[in-house]
Amino acid sequence: MAHDAKTQSILSFLEAQAAAYPAVAGELTQMSDLYTRKLWHQLTLSLQAVAAMEGSAPLLQPLYDTFVSDFKHKLNKLALAQLQIAVARQTTDPEKQAFFCKQAAEEAAKDDQQASSFILCELARMHLDAGQVEDCKARLDEAAKFLESAAGVDNAVQASYYRSWASYYKIKGPAAEFYKHALLLLAYEPLAQMSKAEALTISFDLGIAALVGEGLYNFGELLEHPVVATLESTDFAWLADLLRAFNAGDIAQYESLVQSHGPKLEAQPALLANTTFLKEKITLMCLTETLFQRIGPSGDRTVPFTAIASAANLPVEQVELLVMRALSLKLIRGVIDQVDQTLRVTWVQPRVLQTAQISLMSERLQTWCGTVNKTLVFLENETPEFSSG
């Protein structure tokens, strides 16, 4: 079959590249066949496979410039965007990266806002790598205009969006924002789909953020997540133990871990800078756990200060300040009786329950059902005229 001059030039290019890169020669030969047969979907899959292959990086730029540019308008826009990002990452010049990606994003926006947003999210992380933090946020704000209101967005795009935000907040803070966006990332790209290095890094960072993040007083969701299993199989198992101690409000366990893993904790700047906050936080979590044990229909909601002092390992005179702090943070609702030195609890912050806590709630509900049934029988016996006959 005869080919026109342009096609022949492209086929000759692929043949030359196959000779230069023996590791991907088979894939390049297949590309030649798919290109001549105009099988664009299969060609897209082949390009993605080559881009993911080890040792293919030096080939990507010439492959894109000489080969892909000829038919890129035929490709799936998101797949093309992913290939363009792989190409952009081959240069270490931030200005060249930004120019190439902005041009690609503007071109994609004409037909596919999702693909354009993906490019912006990936460019945002390139800005971070270059130390351009504010440029990173600017690109993410651009992407947010579409992604925050769009439905049916591809998981790869959502993962890119939340990975970039998590990376931004890891540098800029606050820790609670990193925690939120990192968990959202894992909803779209589970740890099992990440490299081992990234999975461990994000698991460790999530654990630290949970501890030092303001407003984070329940780690139930995190403890149910593979993040903890990832930490347990490494030298960071102490962090998994620390998270469990905090979630249970177990001050004795916390102090034991600080004693046995002191040097490891001190080696983490975020923990070292927040020692006072961490002590306050676990004391507050101890308070909420103590009060949680008392909620329910048969629970005694009036709690003496002495009971709180005993659980939190505090002098009784410091209990009122602790309770007031919990009230101000909206961790609990209730009324303090300064005369009787008691707290009347009306509400404790909702939490992701562990198995033991679910068992406690089940027992409380069974007791409550029994009480309701007894009351119903009593009323039926006392007022037979209202009973159905």
Image: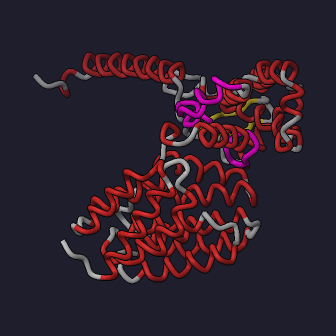
Drawn side of residue 385 relative to residue 132, left or right? left
Quadrant containing the C terminus in the rendered view = top left
Which of the pair 143/116 is nearer the observer? Answer: 116
Which of the pair 128/9 is nearer the observer? Answer: 9
- State whether residue 346 appears in this view: no
- Where is 37 relative to 229, above or below? below
Locate residue 341: give its quadrant: top right
Quadrant containing the N terminus in the rendered view = bottom left
> Residue sitting at 66 percent across and 52 percent down?
178
> In the rendering, at what x and y percent does residue 299 appear?
55, 23
> In the rendering, at what x and y percent does residue 103 appear?
53, 82
Which region is colored magenta? 210-234
Drawn side of residue 141 relative to residue 113, left or right? right
| Residue 211 painted magenta | yes
Drawn side of residue 31 relative to residue 338, left or right? left
- State whether residue 272 appears in this view: yes
> Residue sitting at 32 percent across and 19 percent down?
373
Drawn side of residue 325 relative to residue 108, left or right? right
> Residue sitting at 58 percent across and 68 percent down?
88
> In the rendering, at what x and y percent does residue 315 appear?
89, 25
> Residue sitting at 55 percent across and 66 percent down?
121
